[in-house]
């Protein structure tokens, strides 16, 4: 029975680290050969990391990337490799190289360039126009890249009609909640529509605002999953693709044969890959590499793991040894500290507890209990003295003005300054603790609690913060985040008796409204919404719009929703449109 | 003799202010009619302002913009108007409406969408495919939009070959140094190549990082300037376009007649504009609207005016009444204060002088002299007490660590906090004072001197800061910026005897290197550069790359160079590429 052994190298590239990425690639080529694979596949732009952004406007960077590919080429002998890189011809292309026998056998240029959401590919690349297919032994294979797959009439269709039985689709597809299911549904449909096996490889790892979830998939001609890569981890997925079923299905469901008749076969370039030396393909797949049929992560675990990987990679890839976090005894900083410990280990996480006269006894107790549960060090830095010295200095200038948000922000900014001092002195990265609900309405102090290098839960709505904490406790089978932190009312504790609900509706009411406005650009009519009438909605939209200037100065954070602040939602600061 | 009277309304739209923009448009329609114009023209996206960014992803915004156009349409009777708006058909288009007799006569869809530098038009718009021409009386006119003009084979060519004698090109073309000349050269070439008169209208005003310079141009079929709009001001440019010269030129230089022969005339849609009631076109152009043949602004005046307009519009359009600036007695804050006074008036500018123990007596004297010259109020806020209270609080945590950048940043951040307190208390916008050289190498404190809402000279290299100050003094015919500020060595005064040159080469050496690296993506070889050997260059490039995280949190500032930080240069923070 005809079959082909494929290895998908679900790797974690680092943007710009050409040398490091090549060395990872060579390592996986070797591992795939040992496992008897006929072909080993690497993600979209595996050589450069994704997205390289304006590095792509440097000719030297393009040249260095070509040199890096050459290094891989010289190493790929008795196996076929598909490697994502930047090709340079008349223009530059987001490309996949097919390598074998130390030769460059052919190149595919991505045809559909995404230029929406977080993507800017028209800024950099020319779109490809050709879709070659490659023969390995007796099997024709089509190669295409990420976005290409989302078009029913895209290169996949052409490649399949020209005779490809396997489609290799390499991706750098960022995570968002629910994307796994959308991806699988689409791949199943394409495989069924085109009677092909699809091996769809995704990259894995964090890059600034993005986290790539891996979760590569191989689906057969009936749309069933043959293999699934780990989520949020590097992986080498090895599978034997059985090809007899494809002709059988074509005979039984001949729709595609009708279509192929009408198809201009001359339009597709056909490239033969030289025969590799017979590798160990007849043997069993080594036990440690055989398919793991792990269940897909449960929803909150998936989100949590995305946040852990995004944080770990930002810290590691930017060369920080540790992080420092302002702990308030509230749910947000508790979640961030817990994620940080899971990402970096407790020895690399320090908490600062910075009480003011408005800080409650409970906040102190809860902070220390959390720190005990996590096993992290807490330093206590009272801000009362510094706060008083500011007030003394400013007294004569602010004479006659009642205390207002100025004095509240002062405290938040003193804390920001303390955190940054620890960052400067010890080389730690400051993680900020603001959630998406706060970032949306501007319920955060610029240069205060917004001060820091990475905003871990910036795209996590407040209601989901609670859910993630509850999941984390239940997953641990014990209390990590103290119970009282869940039950007390949210407060910034910047004046006596302050509560978030003084100025905002409850988060259960607020969060769905924010999603409708920010992620879905939904219209609102005059009927309002349960718990928030038309005036309340207008007020919230006004707060979101007016806070754009703050968000523009916010540190990056991990995208987990349909639409995150940052590169994903590009809004003018100067904007008089009030759509409601 | 055939002629057509045109009015170009060089207006300052505000993004999202549909009502305000319409009311400006109606006002100019009226003025143009009074002046006897046959046709009045408004800039690209005059209805919505430019760039509306992700407002374009809201269907309600698109609908509101169509309703706004309708309002204009109902007002345009005995004159023809060309108005930039967002069209909605099967998709959305960056479009120009041709209106007359209260009817929508036709629409042009922009064909070439810029998606580089600061532009993201593929993110929003579908590209047009048709290039209609319009007949007013006996004259055929082509309409196209901005980027369209930069392609020799673009719609202009098609329109000219189909018989258009006048090309109306509407723009939202952002300012950068030297762009005026590039634009004029291109327009002259196109006019000559195609034997047409080109009326190229640009918008004017500030929008976040961009400033539009106006400077609209009308060039005749020989490439000579007939009229020129004001730079950095609203204007209504009225001119009589004499058409006989066009056929005459075609007879004498028949290249275009040869080409027209080969041109498929059926491909262009021809639309007749209904005859408007004879307006006052036979009269003289009113004296107050007749052509001003003002010379183009001198280089430093031009840049200075860009900064003044960008600042004025950011403050005004965002509803601030005044600004507050940290004055140090240095050249950067002196320039920013001077620009602020020119933009907003001295009553709306307050300076804070915030001495520390490291502040020299000269700095104090120079600050007060500058303030006297500008007529602005200075508040003196010593930071020594607050600084000491931080040191006291942190002492036990930093025991054993020598003073380092931590203590320097603390001072800068105390100043940032003071400025923000004044902002919060009095509703003033904080203007930051960092220049491009500092922003490039990260010689600035995040949340310290980088704290504020608008970074006026963020794109101005340090050497140019001196040149602009010198120009401003000489233009005033007196000393505004005190002489000693020019001659003393640059210092952040955060520790005793500190000088910028402790860690950096002189700015005369640094600035050309920064331009080569940041604006031009130039390669460096091992030979180095005068005043900076290979090691020094490697060090500088490293500083630039490592400071990306700071710049990502910087307030927006006005683009004046080929490539500014912000939307213009999109760099990964996590990036291990070291191209040198």
Image: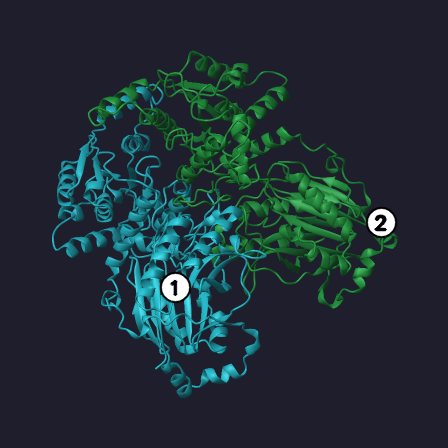
Chain colours: A green, B cyan
Pinpoint residue B540: horizontal percent, then vertical percent: 36, 48
Of the pair B219 and B272, the residue shown nearer to us: B272
Determine which residue is flagged by label 2: A245
User: Is residue A525 found left or right of B11 in the rendered image?
Assistant: right
Position of B142 relative to A482 (above/below): below
Pinpoint residue A157: horizontal percent, then vertical percent: 72, 57
Pinpoint residue B477: horizontal percent, then vertical percent: 12, 55
Of the pair B104 and B153, the residue shown nearer to us: B104
Q: Dot 2: what SS?
A: helix
User: Is residue B561 found left or right of A296 in the rendered image?
Assistant: left
Of the pair A296 and A64, the residue shown nearer to us: A296
**As drawn, which residue projects farthest toward the left?**
B478
Within 10 angstroms of label 2, few (less than 14), some, or many (20 or more) residues?
Answer: some
Of the pair A502 and B149, the residue shown nearer to us: A502
Report which quarter residue A472 is drawn in.
top right
Look at the image and tell me whether residue B58 can be seen: no
Labels 2, 1: one chain: no
User: Is residue B519 found left or right of B231 in the rendered image?
Assistant: right
Closer to the eye: label 2 or 1 = 1
Q: CA distance from mark 2 to mark 1?
A: 65 Å
Q: Dot 1: what SS?
A: strand
**As drawn, which residue projects farthest toward the front?**
B277
Within 10 angstroms of label 1, few (less than 14), some, or many (20 or more) residues?
Answer: many
User: Is residue A216 found left or right of B371 in the rendered image?
Assistant: right
Pinpoint residue B104: horizontal percent, then vertical percent: 48, 62
Q: Which mark is residue B41?
A: 1
Look at the image and tell me whether residue B318 can be seen: yes
């Amino acid at each position: 029975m005809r079959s082909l052994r494929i290895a998908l190298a679900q790797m974690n590239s680092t943007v710009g680290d050409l040398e490091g990425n090549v060395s990872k690639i060579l390592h996986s080529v070797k591992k795939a050969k040992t496992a008897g694979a006929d072909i080993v596949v690497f993600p979209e732009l595996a050589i450069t990391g994704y997205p390289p952004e304006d590095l792509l406007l440097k000719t030297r960077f393009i040249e260095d990337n070509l040199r890096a590919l050459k290094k891989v080429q010289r190493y790929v002998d008795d196996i076929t490799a598909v490697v994502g890189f930047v090709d340079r011809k008349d223009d530059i292309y987001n490309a996949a190289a097919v390598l074998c026998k130390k030769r460059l056998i052919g190149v595919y240029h991505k045809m559909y360039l995404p230029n929406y959401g977080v993507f800017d590919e028209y800024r950099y690349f020319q779109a490809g126009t050709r879709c070659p297919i490659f023969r390995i032994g007796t099997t024709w294979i089509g190669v295409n890249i990420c976005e290409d797959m989302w078009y029913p009439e895209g290169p996949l269709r052409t490649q399949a009609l020209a005779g490809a039985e396997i489609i290799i689709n390499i991706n750098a597809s960022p995570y968002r909640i629910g994307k796994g299911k959308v991806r699988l549904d689409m791949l199943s449909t394409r495989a069924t529509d085109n009677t092909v096996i699809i091996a769809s490889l995704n990259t894995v790892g964090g890059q600034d605002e993005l986290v790539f979830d891996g979760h590569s998939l191989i689906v057969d001609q009936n749309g069933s999953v043959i293999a699934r890569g780990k989520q949020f981890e590097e992986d080498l997925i090895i599978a034997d693709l059985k090809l007899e079923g494809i002709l059988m299905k074509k005979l039984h469901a001949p729709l595609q044969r009708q279509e192929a008749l009408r198809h201009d076969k001359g339009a597709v370039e056909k490239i033969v890959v030289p025969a590799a030396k017979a590798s160990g393909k007849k043997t069993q797949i080594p036990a440690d590499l055989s398919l793991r049929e792990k269940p897909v992560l449960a929803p909150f675990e998936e989100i949590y793991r995305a946040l852990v990987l995004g944080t770990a990679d930002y810290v590691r890839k930017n060369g920080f040894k540790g992080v420092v976090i302002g702990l308030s005894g509230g749910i947000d900083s508790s979640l961030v500290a817990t994620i940080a410990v899971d990402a970096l280990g407790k020895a690399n996480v320090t908490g600062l507890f910075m009480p003011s006269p408005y800080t409650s006894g409970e906040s102190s107790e809860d902070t220390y209990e959390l720190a005990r549960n996590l096993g992290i060090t807490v330093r206590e830095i009272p801000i009362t003295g510094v706060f008083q010295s500011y007030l003394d200095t400013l007294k004569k200038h602010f004479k006659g003005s009642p205390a207002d948000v100025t004095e509240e922000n002062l405290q938040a900014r003193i804390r920001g300054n303390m955190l940054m001092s620890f960052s400067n002195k010890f080389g730690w990265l400051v993680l900020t603790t603001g959630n998406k609900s706060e970032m949306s309405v501007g319920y955060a102090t610029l240069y205060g609690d917004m001060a820091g290098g990475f905003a871990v839960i910036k795209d996590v709505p407040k209601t989901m913060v609670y859910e993630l904490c509850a999941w984390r406790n239940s997953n641990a089978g014990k209390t990590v985040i103290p119970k009282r932190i869940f039950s007390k009312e949210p407060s910034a504790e910047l004046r006596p008796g302050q509560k978030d609900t003084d100025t905002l509706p409850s988060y259960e009411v607020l969060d769905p409204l924010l999603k409708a406005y920010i992620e879905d650009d939904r219209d609102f009519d005059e009927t309002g919404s349960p718990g928030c009438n038309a005036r309340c909605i207008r007020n919230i939209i006004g707060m979101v719009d007016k806070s754009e200037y703050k968000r523009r100065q916010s540190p990056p954070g991990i995208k987990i929703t349909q639409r995150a602040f940052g590169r994903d939602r590009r809004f003018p600061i100067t904007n008089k449109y009030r759509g409601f």
